[in-house]
Amino acid sequence: MTRMMTVLCVFFCALFCLGGCSQGRGQSLTTDFAADFTADYRGMTLEGKLTYTRQESLNLTVRSPGTLDGVTVGYRGGELTLGRDSLRCTADEAYLPCRSFPSLMKDALTAVCDAYENDRLNLKEHTAEVTLPQGKCEIKTDDNAYITEITVQSEELRVRLTGNSAL
């Protein structure tokens, strides 16, 4: 009788422990990707290419408007790189204002991916919200787990991402 009770206790303990581990994240999210972007930012429309990886790496290449065509902005491990054509300069990322377009993109993507990796991203019906120092950020995703839109209302920022591909 005690042997049977011991077996049942072990079985129920395993059932409760493994039951808690089997819950998934819900909807998935691709956190390392490249995409084309169209951004409406403070009355200006920007177009270009974005590449983001969780190794603290963001690269933006602007194609439009023409006055900014070819401008690149890169973040990697706290270092900022600005460039155009063959001219490049680097600095600590703290020198770029936190309300600038590249800073907002980096902050939004980092916050979303951190929340996802720590199971704090409540992604329901392809929509989620995170809080940035600049305000609330809403993201939308598609059926393939790619981010398709980023909005930070307080900063007049709306970015649409198309042609996503995983890295």
Image (tube, grey):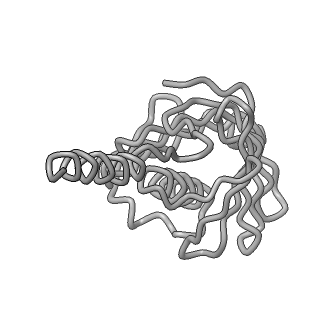
Residue 39 percent across, percent down from the top left: 76, 48
Q: Position of residue 20 (x, y in %)?
A: 41, 53
Residue most toward the right?
43
Query: How many circles with numbers are drawn on the protein?
Result: 0
The single residue placed furthest to the left in the displayed view is 3
Residue at the spot 73% in from the left edge and 42% down from the top edge: 67
34 vs 53, left or right, is: right
The answer to which of 21 and 74 lies nearer the viewer is 21
Give the residue at x 35% y 48%: 90
Image coordinates for residue 151, horizontal then vertical, percent: 74, 59
| x 80%, y 54%: residue | 40
Whether residue 94 is situated above or below residue 118 in the rendered picture: below
With respect to residue 84, does 128 lie above or below?
A: below
Residue sitting nearer the eye, 116 or 108:
116
Give the left or right position of residue 54, taking residue 123 as reference: left
Residue 68, quarter of the rendered image: top right
Towards the viewer: 163 or 114 = 114
Q: Is residue 46 left or right of residue 23?
A: right
Tell me if 42 is positioned left or right of 26 in this view. right
The image shows residue 144 at horizontal and vertical percentages of 68, 29
x 51%, y 39%: residue: 31
